[in-house]
Image (cartoon, rainbow, N blue to C red):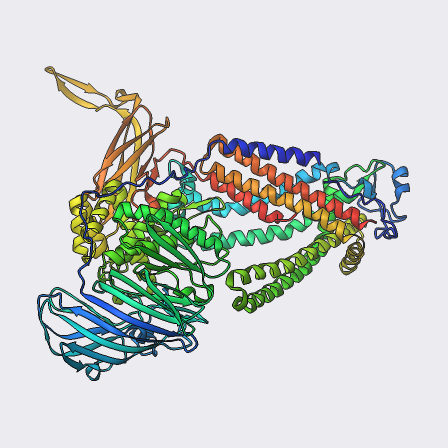
């Protein structure tokens, strides 16, 4: 064995020598600095729609019997003569619902439930002082020619004046579906979202932002206080929005009351197999509910929150609620994972997923980020889904990179793939298809929705951050999130904030990227380098005519040349161009990117060998990174020796087999 | 770890009957037929006589040239297999002043852009590479046969290595029998793994309700590991059969037995060895496998550490990687030598 011992020793020694200067920079400890400390933010939301509800779960029939009161205030400037109420569980009632009949693929919610779901209103009474008006008979569940029952119109017996508050008494019965699109049951596991009759958001102009439950759509609601009492069989463990203020056990039932203000939705879960772990982080009581055997994932999710709570707090303002509940659904109910509700998020990922594949951390950070963009900003997700998902994907990318370094997507088996790099690659394929800024219901496919709303929006913001300065972007989004906390911002608010904080160029690129399918492709199209020559010909100098022949113009110690860079597309980012000389020296030239092309003259003591536009890979939206460089004619290219070497090693390894 | 001693049968075991009945003269294309090679032959063989080596003579370390030949073969094949992806990388990234170093930058921006390209190149390169791997994998049976021939036979009293030409000729003659044994064993291993996947999946589903999905998945892995273990044992037995087949063909010279008989004899020898010494075979194969996997890990880690560096670092990495390949070729030779000793004569 001496030969093999020698070989192995040599390999180990060489590996040790190589290890002494590894190229991958590891992320240092995250630095938490307040992005916009001078910008005040609202302490509380305006109470518009508040719900005092009770819910009783039958885990065998998978029903919820609900009831209670809704107080609603006309926060618009106009009288209102009707209400619009969302009954979203009816999306799973039959295949004629808007949700079920949407020909959408490539996104979540593609499974047809094996057990249908529904919400049936049993009582709807307007309490008007001593007067009680039964509104149930007048409820208009469907539109002519449309079987969808998720968006109900409720005529009122009289107009509600601006600023006036009304009270509704409601009772209903939910039949939960098998898990589909984030809600339903799987065995005794129940994820109860979109489960109560909910009044659509009233806009300032007196119109309701009402919409059916669309396949790709999410939510939009008024803020209020939710006081919800949940009644489940004893032995079940409940996780819900807001802190528990009262717990009772009576007649074999567990009754928990949760109260939370400044929120716009309420969700809960109940399962008799949950393992519970609690920890207080920055004053927030964090609870993780997970299936048995997920101890490592629970720890990873808590690690994530230990990072995310201070990180997001510094960037986007302090998390204002006293609790946060993380629900890790069982694998068979994975469709319930990856969703956000106020103070409650659902995570996911299979139990075997090792560290290095940061998907547990990514989904946890992403869903927590929604507490800001969906929860606190509360923009219209149906009309502008990117304002939540796109901004949140950017925040997820930023946070993961700050935490995990360049391998923030995965850092495994020698591969370090960034979260944002993966998003930008996905985004490039859909840049010409559709706009980012459009309603959730108008995307042609789920794939386009995902790639544009999540990935391209995030890549656009990251490109702006890299092109104009990350500190500026940190501050801009910090200002946006503080200024519009509880305010339901629109794309105009975002673009205006970017203009104010970063500048008009960034705002124009953001506008074009969001609303006009903006794209960009920088390319080096020509390079030239040759020995320097002075001008030949006849010159009149000092009263004499001098003729210089071409063979006497050569300057052997100087080289001239040029690089031609072009910018294709509609986005105009400033970039750098790196010029590489044959002596190995490198220099950089800045270009504002405003014109369609830029000719860079070259003059140096050695020939120009090559040029690269955007050498630091700042323009993640660049449609074709493979044309960002060129080697001057007549010069040898650097080639691809690393790929050949790695390819040979792995080919030989595969050829030899894993075993001897 | 101590090399198992297997030149003498264990108590209660009988030495296996010789399956080879020929010796050959290295300089002659016509082998002599006659008496089986025995310890007597070693004492009386002249320097040009090809003979079957005694078990205690069969050592990989005595065949460094054969191991170097295997390494050279793998290097050449690897170059050809890697050529499509190298050409693709060179055509796309070669003109970058840093060349393909950009593909190794942390974050993977250029790498993802390259692999995510909408063009047909990835599919073409992937398929071409797979085909090349398969072709060279099949042709590799000749090299395995030649290696076994080199390990199992020797010239003269000292058992000097036969010429590479002679070994290669034996490898070529052993090609179809070895390939057939390999296909049979592969089919059997595949079937076992397939059944294992089905059984483990059923186990997982059956246990989910009572144990939860995480623990049920652990049970699934355990069941699958059992089946994988059985498949590995089949692989070891197949290796025993392969060395028996290749050795017999090498010793038969230019008049090998018909293929089916060679295969049958090899399988019989493997079965007999399995009954007699499957524990020792598994142990011998096992530690070499662990070392082989460790070498692969070292090679991968070295590549990870080197990243996109070029120049001297890249050359150093190349040397490290080739030493890994060479060491693995040596381990393979060592295992085959051990298998030959176990199969006996």
- Farthest residue to the bottom: give it: A137
Q: Is residue B279 above or below residue A542?
A: below
Residue A492 spot, x, y in % from top left: 16, 55
Residue at the image position 51 percent from the left and 63 percent from the top = B213
Q: Is residue B79 visible?
A: no
Residue B260 vs B143, above or below: the answer is: below
Asked if A376 appears above or below A550 in the picture, the reply is below
Q: Is B212 on the left-hand or right-hand side of A397?
A: right
Relative image position of residue B234 (x, y in whole percent): 70, 57
A574 and B180: which is toward the camera: A574
Decide if residue B183 is on the left or right side of residue A654: right
Frontmost residue, B84 versus B234: B234
**x, y percent for residue A130:** 14, 79
Residue B222 visible somewhere in the drawing? yes
Q: Nearer the viewer, residue A187 or B149?
A: A187
Number of on-image labels: 0
Depicted A633 relative to depicted A243: above or below: above
Is A240 placed left or right of A46 in the picture? right
Rendered image quadrant of residue A265: bottom left
Residue drawn at (44%, 51%), measured in percent from left and top? A300
Name the quadrant of the N terminus of chain B: top right
Instruction: Kindly indicate the quadrant of the structure image that contains residue A440.
Output: bottom left
Residue A46 located left or right of residue B23:
left
Percent position (x, y) of residue A524?
Answer: 30, 41
């Amino acid at each position: 064995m001496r030969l093999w011992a020698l070989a192995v020793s040599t390999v180990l020694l060489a590996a040790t020598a190589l290890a002494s200067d590894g190229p991958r920079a590891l992320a240092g400890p995250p630095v938490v600095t307040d992005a916009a400390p001078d910008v005040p933010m609202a302490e509380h939301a305006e109470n518009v729609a508040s719900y005092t509800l009770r819910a009783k779960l039958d885990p065998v029939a998978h029903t919820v019997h609900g009831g209670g009161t809704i107080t609603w205030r006309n926060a618009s400037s106009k009288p209102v003569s009707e209400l619009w109420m969302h009954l979203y569980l009816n999306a799973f009632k039959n295949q004629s619902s808007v949700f079920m009949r949407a020909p959408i693929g490539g996104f979540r919610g593609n499974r047809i439930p094996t057990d249908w779901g529904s919400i049936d209103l049993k009582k709807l009474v307007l309490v008007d002082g001593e007067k009680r008006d039964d509104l149930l008979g007048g409820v208009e569940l469907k539109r002519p020619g449309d079987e969808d029952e998720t968006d109900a119109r409720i005529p009122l017996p009289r107009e509600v004046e601006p600023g006036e508050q009304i009270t509704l008494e409601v009772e209903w019965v939910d039949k939960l579906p098998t898990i589909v699109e984030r809600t339903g049951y799987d065995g005794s596991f129940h994820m109860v979202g979109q489960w109560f009759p909910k009044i659509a958001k009233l806009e300032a102009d007196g119109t309701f932002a009402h919409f059916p439950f669309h396949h790709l759509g999410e939510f939009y609601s008024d803020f209020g206080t939710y006081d919800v009492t949940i009644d489940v069989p004893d032995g079940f463990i409940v996780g819900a929005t807001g802190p528990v203020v009262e717990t009772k056990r009576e007649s074999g039932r567990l009754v928990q009351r949760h109260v939370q203000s400044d929120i716009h939705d309420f969700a809960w879960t109940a399962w008799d197999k949950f393992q519970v772990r609690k920890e207080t982080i920055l004053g927030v009581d964090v609870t993780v509910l997970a299936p048995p055997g997920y101890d490592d994932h629970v720890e990873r999710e808590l690690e994530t929150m230990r990072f995310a709570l201070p990180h997001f707090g510094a960037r986007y303002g302090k998390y204002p609620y006293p609790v946060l509940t993380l629900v890790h659904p069982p694998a068979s109910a994975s469709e319930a994972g990856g969703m956000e509700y106020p103070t409650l998020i659902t995570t996911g990922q299979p139990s075997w997923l090792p560290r290095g594949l940061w998907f547990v951390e990514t989904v946890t950070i992403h869903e927590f980020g929604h507490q800001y963009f969906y929860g606190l900003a509360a923009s219209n997700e149906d009309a502008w889904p990117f304002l939540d998902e796109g901004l949140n994907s950017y925040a997820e990318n930023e946070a993961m990179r700050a935490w995990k370094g360049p391998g923030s997507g995965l850092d495994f088996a020698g591969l370090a793939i960034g979260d944002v790099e993966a998003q930008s690659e996905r985004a490039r394929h859909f840049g010409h298809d559709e706009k980012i800024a459009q309603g959730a219901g108008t995307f042609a496919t789920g794939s386009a929705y995902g790639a544009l709303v999540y990935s391209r929006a995030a890549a656009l913001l990251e490109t702006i951050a890299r092109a104009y300065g990350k500190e500026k972007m940190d501050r801009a989004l910090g200002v946006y999130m503080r200024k519009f906390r509880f305010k339901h911002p629109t794309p105009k608010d975002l673009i205006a904030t970017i203009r104010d904080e970063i500048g008009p160029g960034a705002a124009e690129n953001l506008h074009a990227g969001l609303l006009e399918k903006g794209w960009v492709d920088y390319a080096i199209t020509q390079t030239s380098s040759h020995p320097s020559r002075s001008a030949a010909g006849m010159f009149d100098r000092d009263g004499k005519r001098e003729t210089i022949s071409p063979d006497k113009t050569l300057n052997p110690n100087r080289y001239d040349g040029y690089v031609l860079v072009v910018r294709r597309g509609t986005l105009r980012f400033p970039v750098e161009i790196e010029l590489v000389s044959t002596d190995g020296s490198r220099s950089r030239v800045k270009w504002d990117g405003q014109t369609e092309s830029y000719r860079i003259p070259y003059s140096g003591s050695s020939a120009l060998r090559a040029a690269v536009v955007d050498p630091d890979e700042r323009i993640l939206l660049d449609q074709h990174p493979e044309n960002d460089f060129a080697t001057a004619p007549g010069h040898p290219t650097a080639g691809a020796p690393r790929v050949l070497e790695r390819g040979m090693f792995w080919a030989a390894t595969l050829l030899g087999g894993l075993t001897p | 770890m101590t090399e198992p001693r297997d030149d003498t049968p264990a108590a209660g075991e009988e030495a296996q009957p010789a399956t080879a009945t020929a010796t050959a003269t290295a300089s002659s294309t016509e082998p002599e037929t006659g008496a089986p090679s025995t310890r007597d032959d070693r004492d009386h063989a002249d320097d040009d006589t090809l003979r079957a080596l005694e078990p205690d003579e069969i050592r990989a370390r005595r065949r460094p040239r054969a191991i170097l030949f295997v390494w050279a073969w793998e290097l050449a094949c690897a170059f050809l297999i890697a050529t499509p992806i190298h050409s693709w990388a060179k055509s796309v990234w070669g003109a970058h002043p840093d060349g393909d170093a950009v593909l190794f930058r942390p974050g993977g921006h250029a790498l993802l852009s390259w692999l995510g390209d909408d063009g047909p190149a990835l599919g073409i390169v992937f398929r071409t590479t797979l085909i090349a791997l398969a072709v060279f994998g099949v042709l590799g049976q000749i090299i395995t046969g030649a290696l076994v021939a080199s390990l199992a036979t020797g010239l003269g009293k000292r058992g000097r290595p036969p010429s590479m030409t002679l070994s290669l000729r034996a490898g070529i003659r052993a090609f179809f029998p070895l390939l057939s044994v390999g296909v049979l064993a592969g089919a059997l291993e595949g079937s076992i793994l397939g059944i294992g996947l089905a059984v483990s999946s059923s186990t997982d589903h059956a246990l989910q309700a009572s144990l939860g999905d995480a623990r049920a998945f652990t049970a699934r892995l355990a069941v699958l590991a059992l089946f994988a273990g059985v498949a590995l044992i089949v692989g070891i037995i197949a290796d025993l059969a392969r060395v028996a087949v290749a050795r017999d063909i090498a010793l038969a010279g230019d008049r090998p037995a018909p293929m089916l008989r060679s295969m049958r004899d090899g399988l019989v020898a493997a079965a007999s060895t399995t009954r007699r010494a499957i524990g020792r075979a598994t142990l011998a194969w096992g530690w070499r496998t662990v070392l082989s996997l460790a070498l692969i890990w070292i090679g991968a880690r070295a590549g990870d550490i080197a990243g996109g560096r070029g120049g001297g670092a890249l050359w150093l990495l190349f040397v490290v990687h080739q030493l890994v390949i060479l060491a693995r070729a040596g381990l393979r030779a060592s295992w085959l030598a051990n298998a030959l000793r176990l199969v006996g004569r």
